[in-house]
Amino acid sequence: MPMPEDVVTHPDYPIPGMYKAWVLGDPGQLTYEEKPMMVPGPAEVLVHIDAISICATDFEIIDHGPPALIEGGLPFNKGFTPGHEYMGTVMALGPGVDEFAVGDRVTVEIHAGCGRCKRCREGMYTACVNYGMNYGNADKGHRANGFSTDGGYGEYAVNHVNTLIRIDDSMSDEEATLVVTAGTAMYGLTELGGLVAGESVVVTGPGPIGLLGVAVAKALGAQPVILTGTRDNRLDIGKRLGADHVVNVRERDPVEAVREITGGKGVDYVLECSGAANALNEAAYMVNRGGRICLAAFPSEKVPVDVAHLVRNNIYVYSIRGEGKSGTHRAEAFMRQKRFDATLIHTHTFPMAELPEALRHARERIGDAIKVVVRNPPIAARRADAA
C-alpha cells in the first residue's frame, strides 16, 4: 500500500492495502474482518503484530465493555478491535520518528497518555485524566491500544513511540508478549518503594501478574518471597520463578502461615494480585506495622475493609493501573538478562484465525492454561512470499 510521502517504509517490508482483524460487535461477538490499512501519524509507527497474549481484562471488554471506552461510550458495534499484550515488527515510521527503524522487533505498553494533563506529566500515564477522550473535537491525545483505540487481535496496529520497547533477538515472540505482564508487576513493586532487596514480600494470587510478581521481586533481591494461592500447579511454577515459600490457602490460613514464616513479625510488603473479596484485609493482617500493600487486581463487587486496623498500624495502601512509570522497560531489561524465565507461564499457542478457541482455553483454563498466545505468520515469511 502506498503510504504518504512523509511516512518512512522499506521495500523489504511491503504493506498491504487491507488487513484482517477481529472486530467486536454485540457483547461477546467477535468476527474476523478486513479493515483498511492504518497510516501512522506524527510520533507513531505501524506495527505488524507477530504475537499477542490473552489477558483476563480482554474478557471484561468483550463481554461487558468497560474498561474499554470508544467514542466516549461502550465499545460495541463501533468497528473496535480489542487485545493489548502484543509484540511485533515495525513496518512504517510516522512523520518525525527516528527512535526506531523499519524491521525492529518491539513489544508494547498499552497506554500512551495525553502528555498534557497533571498525571501524565508525573509519569502516571496509565491514570491519564483524559483517558478515552481521543475522537473528534474532544481529541486530547490519549491512546490505550485495546481499550480506547484499536488493539492487537489482528495483523496490524498503530502505536505511539512512547509505548514501544525494542527487544533482543534472544527473546522469543511468545516471551516478548509477557513483558507488559512483568512490567505491571514491576510498576506495583516500584510504587511500594522499588528498592526491596532484603525486604520480605508476599504475593497473593498466582495468576500471570502474581507469578511474574514473584519473579520480579526475587530479581530485585527480596527475601523471603512468599506466594499464596489455591492451585498447586501454579504454586509450583511460583517456586521455579523464585518463591521461597508457597501457601495453598485451601489448606492453611494464609495470615497464620505468613506470620509463622516470618517469626510472628509479618512482612514488609504485599503485592495483591488475586482480586479476592477479603484480599485487602488479609494483606493488612500479613504486613508489619508501617508495612505497605499494593493492589494490582480488583474484586468484582464492593467489599468491606478493616480501615481501623490500617490506621492503627500505619499501613500504607497503594493501587496501580496497568504498566505505568515505564515498568515494562525495566522488566524487559531483567528478561533480556535472563534474570527469570517468563516463558514458564506460557502454556498454549493458537493461530490468529482461531482466536475464539484461544479465548475459550484461557477463559476456562483448559489444560491448566495460564498465558495463551495467539500468533500471526511471521513477517519474515511474508517478505519471502512477496519476493
Image (spheres, helix red, strand yellow):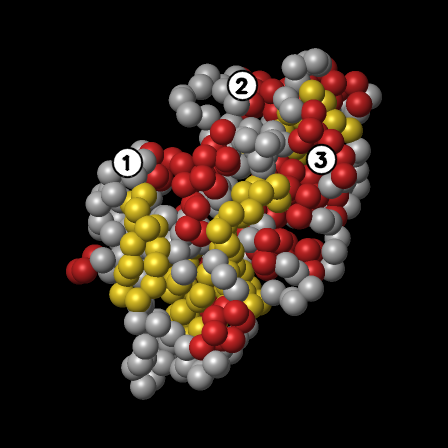
Q: CA distance from mark 2 to mark 3?
A: 22 Å
* Foreground residue among 280 and 227: 227
| Residue type marked 2 | Asn
Q: Which mark is residue 27?
A: 1
Residue placed under numbered mark 2 in the picture: 278
| Residue type marked 3 | Gly
Tag 1 secondary structure: loop
Looking at the picture, does residue 72 appear above or below residue 311?
below
Asked if one can make out residue 141 in the rendered structure from this viewpoint, the answer is yes
Q: Which residue corresponds to the image point at 42% horizontal and 25% vertical from the top-left?
A: 300
Tell me the mark number nearer the camera, choosing from 3 and 1. Answer: 1
Residue placed under numbered mark 3 in the picture: 238
Q: Quadrant of the N terminus?
A: bottom left
Image side of residue 277 versus residue 202, left or right: left
* Foreground residue among 7 and 73: 7
Looking at the picture, does residue 335 appear above or below residue 276?
below
Which mark sits nearer the N-terminus, 2 or 1? 1
Residue 76 sits in which quadrant?
top left
Residue 252 sits in which quadrant?
top right
Tell me the mark number nearer the camera, choosing from 2 and 1. Answer: 1
Tell me the mark number nearer the camera, choosing from 2 and 3. Answer: 3
Task: Determine crowd level at label 1: few under 14, some 14-19, many 20+ residues with C-alpha closer than 10 A.
Answer: some
The location of residue 211, given as percent across then percent down, is 65, 38
Tag 2 secondary structure: loop
Q: Which residue corresponds to the image point at 48% horizontal and 41% vertical from the top-left?
A: 358
Q: Which mark is residue 240?
A: none
Looking at the picture, does residue 97 appear above or below residue 140?
below
Which mark sits nearer the N-terminus, 2 or 3? 3
Q: CA distance from mark 3 to mark 1?
A: 35 Å
